[in-house]
Image: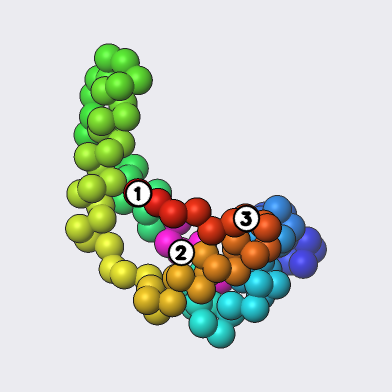
Amino acid sequence: MKRINRTAANSLEEGLEETLTIHRLGLVEILGRGFTTTNLIENLNSQFAKYIRKVKRCVNSDMRARWVAVALIEIEKKMRRINRYEKLHLLRTVLRAELKLEHQKVA
């Protein structure tokens, strides 16, 4: 692949383990379409860049954090739900088992 497109080959090599994680966890049939690409992240990043470029001055890190929070709230209104979002609890269950985490109650 490097002879055809070195950039694409480097990108694939860099994210290969993450790309195949959904397959390794056995969830590709349930959650595959939304989680086997980086489209979600790329879309969020491009929307975020459009919103934040309007900010001309950030005095400190607290102000920067507020701008990020406001941007994400505005972006959220425009985004669609993840396909088969109602099955995300299966991802949590499989990840807990994979990472050997105990179930913890959240207040």
Looking at the image, residue 75 sits to the left or right of residue 20; the answer is left
Relative to 78, say whether 54 is above or below. above
Q: Secondary structure at mark 2?
A: helix
Of pointers 3 and 2, the one earlier in the residue sequence:
2
Q: Secondary structure at mark 3?
A: loop
Q: Residues within 10 Å of mark 1 (few under 14, many from 20)?
A: few
In this view, the residue in front, 61 or 41, is 61
Looking at the image, residue 95 sits to the left or right of residue 83; the answer is right
The reply to whether the magenta stretch includes residue 39 is yes
In this view, the residue in front, 11 or 70, is 70
Q: Is residue 15 visible?
A: no
Q: Position of residue 71 (x, y in %)?
A: 25, 42
Which of the image's four quarters has the N terminus?
Answer: bottom right
Q: Which mark is residue 101?
A: 3
The reply to whether the magenta stretch includes residue 46 is no
Name the residue beneath numbered marker 2.
39
Name the residue beneath numbered marker 1.
107
Residue type, mark 2 in image:
Asn
Q: Residues within 10 Å of mark 3 (few under 14, many from 20)?
A: few
* Circles 3 and 1 in contact, beta carbons < 8 Å: no
Residue type, mark 3 in image:
Leu
What span is colored magenta in the figure? 36-41
Q: Position of residue 49 (x, y in %)?
A: 34, 42
Residue type, mark 1 in image:
Ala
